Amino acid sequence: MAENKDARLKVITTDPLVLETPDHLLAANRITPSTSLFVRNHHGAKHLEDMLPRPMVGDIEISGLVDKPTKVPLSELAKLPKTEVEMVLQCSGNFRFQFSKLSPIKGTPWNKGGIGNVRFAGVRIADFLKAAGVSISADAKYVTAEGADQPEKAAQIDYEKSVPLDVVLARGLLATELNGSLLPAVHGGPVRLVIPGYYGNVQVKWLTRLRFETRETSNFFQLPDYRTPKKRIEPGTPIEYTFDNSDPNFDMKINSRIFAPADNSTVAAGTSVELKGVAWNDGAADLVSVEFSQDSGASWKTTRLAASAGPYAFREWSTSVTFEKGEHSLWLRAQDALGRTQPIDGGLFWNPGGYGWNAVEKIRVMAV
Amino acid sequence: MAENKDARLKVITTDPLVLETPDHLLAANRITPSTSLFVRNHHGAKHLEDMLPRPMVGDIEISGLVDKPTKVPLSELAKLPKTEVEMVLQCSGNFRFQFSKLSPIKGTPWNKGGIGNVRFAGVRIADFLKAAGVSISADAKYVTAEGADQPEKAAQIDYEKSVPLDVVLARGLLATELNGSLLPAVHGGPVRLVIPGYYGNVQVKWLTRLRFETRETSNFFQLPDYRTPKKRIEPGTPIEYTFDNSDPNFDMKINSRIFAPADNSTVAAGTSVELKGVAWNDGAADLVSVEFSQDSGASWKTTRLAASAGPYAFREWSTSVTFEKGEHSLWLRAQDALGRTQPIDGGLFWNPGGYGWNAVEKIRVMAV
């Protein structure tokens, strides 16, 4: 267990370190405390598993399709303007247990806690490149990021990730702070690649190198890992992924959670009960409504939305319901300005990796 | 005016011939009668503007990336099995007036009647190619279709359209019948390329040639015409389209209509009023609900859905409402199994061609 992590996190594996955040810790604050934040490492990097900041020593190497490849000391970051963004950090395998019910899936057996909402701060990559005096070739379309972690066995593949250059330049950060403090090692400190709106797999920890390239890397973690099929397949169907027949797990799908009441909990009948939770998407458009249904989708009512904390952050919602005695079903869905909402049956998106579940949240409560 | 077309169609232009179907004709039957069906021609092909069938003479040429280019006489089609599909036929510029309110747009000034729901029958293109003994190269990714119509002036560009080969092979038809009769000339007879789920611009009339190619044609009607930007732009923003920054208008966006009561009509207060209309999408997933709101989106109720007439057809919905005296707002939206629904504010998708409007339908009625 990572030093100074909340002991109530669920330990999924220790090598690599994978910790899940239980609902009551997510529900307690819109901002997930660093000590409560889930962890998903890929290599057993024991020296990088504590909650302490690492010194700002070392370099970030800039290579590939640039006019002059160079190494920039991390100490240079302190001289550049810092940007802070509140954002959802979520593993694309979050909710994987839902897909696994339809057909077994390997991979981290996430329940609903491979997610948090945090504030990352750091230097915009566009600013960093400008300060480094580096010009990128017009042929470069992707940035491939490498981190300091290494596989422990020679036969294992080192983690790296390619992301579209235009997105990196528009909103990519070299994050050095988490929730107002120096970025803990277990969350990628001293420097982590952070792209708001994207799933966690692109948020490369312990960043050491940015390679500017014409296409996505052929590294295992780019393909076939972290891919979903472009066309729907029946649960259990194997698929040999290619760059053409699959999509990488980049943009987070629109989704929502009911934090209170808890699933299968008991509530008081005949009195007003507060319902609350959060919704989020990829930041490409505003969330316009979060709606709940007490009749399995026959009718929907909108909830109150709290003020937005930015396009990439958890959007809090709440409403009040008076329940009659008995068992009740509660469904929840978010909708955004682009007309994107959550499917009733998430199983339609079953995929062998179990990525991107975003179905309508369905819980049951007993009113007594 | 095309011979034997319903005189109540709205004549938008006569050269080329463009006719729009008013709501009351769409509302009368789930299947739009051939005489009521909208018309959108691209060239002033006077000899192709009547409602008579054309004789099955001539060839379809198969060329490009095939093992043996050939010409197949139309008479061969009668020897092959016929498939019928009920499907929405819709110009991607339908509802263009909604975009035009935000910033003026050239192009056919469609209201809401550039649409119909019909039965096309014909030979599956996959079967046709097999019967012709033609093998397609693995390098072919698109089929470019040409029709017999020609521009009247040398400076004008002949219409042609490229569509993805896998889609053509999966569901493309060489249609020779419309609503159980031979396909009238004005609707593309004797043979029209028909791809259920796609917008009208790909349903090439008077088909004469199929070219198998590695990429989309650079013809004007493929690019820049009939394109929408991949990234949203502000109304009025010009954009120079490229294959990279734009999408062709292929898959129909999820959409719905209220046919009764009519917008701005008067209904009886205090008694049950029937609401009805249709919904549709691209056929990629079932429609799971059609919902109406009487409080501008604060709450939504599902309507009754009629049995499906197939994935590409109009899906009829109905419900009953008792109105209090006064003015009422009615909103309508469809949702499909993939979690796709209609945006509240369609203007977010403004584009210089005014294509693909699919916002929530909003009407007003006065109850007296």
Image (spheres, coloured by chain):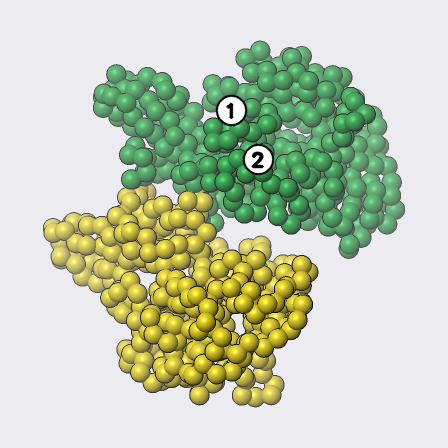
Chain colours: A green, B yellow
For the point 45% across and 81% down, the residue is B56
Residue A2 vs residue B51: left or right? Answer: right
Q: Are marks 2 and 1 on the same chain?
A: yes
The amino acid type found where label 2 is placed reads: Pro
Where residue A307 appears, as percent x and y from the top left, is 46, 36
Where residue A27 appears, as percent x and y from the top left, is 47, 22
Residue A111: mark: 1
Residue B251 vs residue A227: left or right? Answer: left
Mark nearest the camera among 2 and 1 is 2
Residue A352: mark: 2
Residue B299: mark: none
Q: Quick one: label 2, few (<14), some, or many (20+) residues within 10 Å?
A: many
For the point 63% across and 61% down, the residue is B141
Alpha carbon distance from label 2 to label 1: 17 Å
- The chain carrying label 2 is A
Where residue A365 appears, as percent x and y from the top left, is 33, 22
The image quarter in which residue A250 lies? top right
For the point 66% across and 35% down, the residue is A225
